[in-house]
Amino acid sequence: MTALRLGPLLRYADGSSATVWVETGRPCTVEVRCADGSRGTARTFQIAGHHYALVPVTGLTAGTATAYEVYLGDTRVWPLEDSPFPPSEIRTGTTQDPVRVAFGSCRWAAPPAADDDPAGPDALDTLAARLAADPAAERPDVLLLLGDQVYADETSGATQRWLSARRDLSEPPGQGVADYEEYTRLYYESWLDPEVRWLLSTVPSCMIFDDHDVIDDWNTSAAWLADMRDTPWWRERLLSGLASYWVHQHLGNLSPTELAADPVYAAVRETPDATDVLRAFAAGADADPASVRWSYRRDFGRVRLLMVDTRMARVLEEGNRSMLDAGEAQWLRTQALEAPGSYDHLLIGSSLPWLLPHLVHDAEGWDAALCRGEKGARWARFGEKLRRAADLEHWAAFPDSFDALAALIAEAGSGEGAPATVCVLSGDVHHAYVAEPTWPGSGGPDARVLQLTCSPVHNSVPRSIRLGFRFGWSNAARFLGRRIAGHGRVPRPAIDWRRTGGPWFGNQLMTLTMKGRSSRLRLEQARADGQGGARLTTVEESVLTTA
């Protein structure tokens, strides 16, 4: 009998359709049957001995919730027998409903419930427990996972024991994953967590990669990339990372219409064993990153989400560095400016924060100037070493891209039909904060613009990070940053900004609730409840705009 190995994950959902992702034990036909009579079927495709399907479900009615079951052939495999969770549902909204977007990043897989968790309670586990215990609880309409969904370079003890049965961990890449099969282990460890498995089956999700999905500081610089390409194990890690991301995360980000027009998806489904097809696609993405678009757009009523690739889309050559290549930058501009007045809120999902503590921003701009050769070859070599050691590779390390994003946000947020808010949603930096920019001398856009940063969902936050970022947001650090920038002759950025919330440290999620032109923000942290469990505790709630 064919088994359900992973999933189901409810990925895309709109007013009339949805997609459900699964991995099965053997080739089969997967069917999703909804209680309201709507359904969908798909045949599995094969990658590296694994079998997957993304099932389109049609015939849904807007503004309803319907329970669903998953069948492999004639066998029901979901819900699991004796499941303690409520039935998984597909919920379809209307344009009049509020839109709740929960987001965060950096989720290191939680250990089994019987083991100690040095990182503390997992925010996704805790959210799932709350929703399962109280079906009437306010729930997200979509969950945005903004990078580091798996850690290919920082594996758990359990995964290391599994790896050691396959190969010698004293040989590179050591305790990091080496190939596609080892990537699948990471997804099993993360998504078979019972609470998270149920949560992802009933709340739609949007995902984008960040560095640890492949390796820490992925695509930091041209010199970094050249060094990695000279490393014997790198090519297999990268191709496996991109292929597994395409299967497990990227496909589900796309609408049924986009899937129908995707030539790679068509080729994969038409080939009995599509391993070579997908590896060739990944190799092409590595050779010419501009030939592949990982970014995507999703609309939720009058909320527009633009999820932006800030890893593969980079231009790394010194003197021409850019966070987004020309095609990607034009795509972002087109999507942000299309049909002014058709949306009330613009969300830009960037795994890396746009607005950082001023000290960090100035240090990254200074380092970029050194690496460009502004102070000579010796300083350039120092700058490259510092860039890698201190992770100086956010938007501020690409000054032209930082300014271009500021200009685009100002344009999108101004004039007739301007949205009420433009929010950049980010993670990566293992703390949460709210920052608000101003445009000196120009009055700025009509929309309220905010940088909303939230991480980690589940990871450790060392004391050094807590102290460093608390200082980084201080006035003394801001003064120090300007002195450092002055050494590199780095001009002041075109905008200024201030921290208006945080910093907060812990395993946490932010939720934006938007209805009409109103919006409010809530930050919740997962904290032990003293009875062996955990609960989500609200540490910040504020109104951003009113109708």
Image: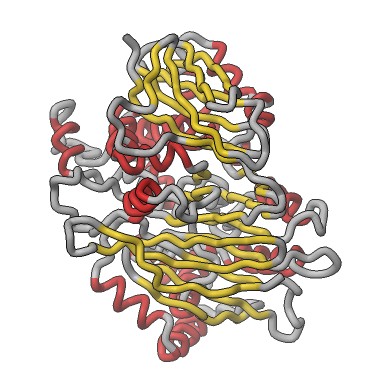
Residue 251: image location, x then y, percent: 53, 32
Is 379 left, or right, of 417 in this rendering? left
Quadrant where the image shows the C terminus: bottom right
Looking at the picture, tell me which residue is in the foreground, 288 or 404. Answer: 404
Q: Name the quadrant containing residue 161.
A: top left
The quadrant in which the N terminus is found is: top left
Residue 4 image-quadrant placement: top left
Residue 60 location, quadrant: top right
Residue under the point 74% across and 64% down: 419
Q: Position of residue 336 (x, y in %)?
A: 72, 55
Q: Nearer the viewer, residue 99 or 230?
A: 99
- In the depicted structure, whether residue 538 falls above or below residue 92: below
Residue 253 visible in rendering: no
Please name the residue shown 36% across and 56% down the image.
457
The residue at the point 86 percent across, 67 percent down is: 416
Question: With 222 as the anchor, is 290 left or right in this view?
Answer: right
Question: Viewer-proximal residue, 328 or 156?
Answer: 156
- Kindly give the residue lying farthest to the right in the view shown: 416
In the displayed structure, 58 sits above or below 45; it is below
Q: Position of residue 369 (x, y in %)?
A: 52, 70
How far across and down, in percent of the image, does residue 371 sit?
A: 48, 65
Residue located at (66% from left, 34% from top): 61
Q: Taking 368 as reference, is 193 left or right?
A: left
Q: Taking 109 as reference, is 517 above or below it?
A: below
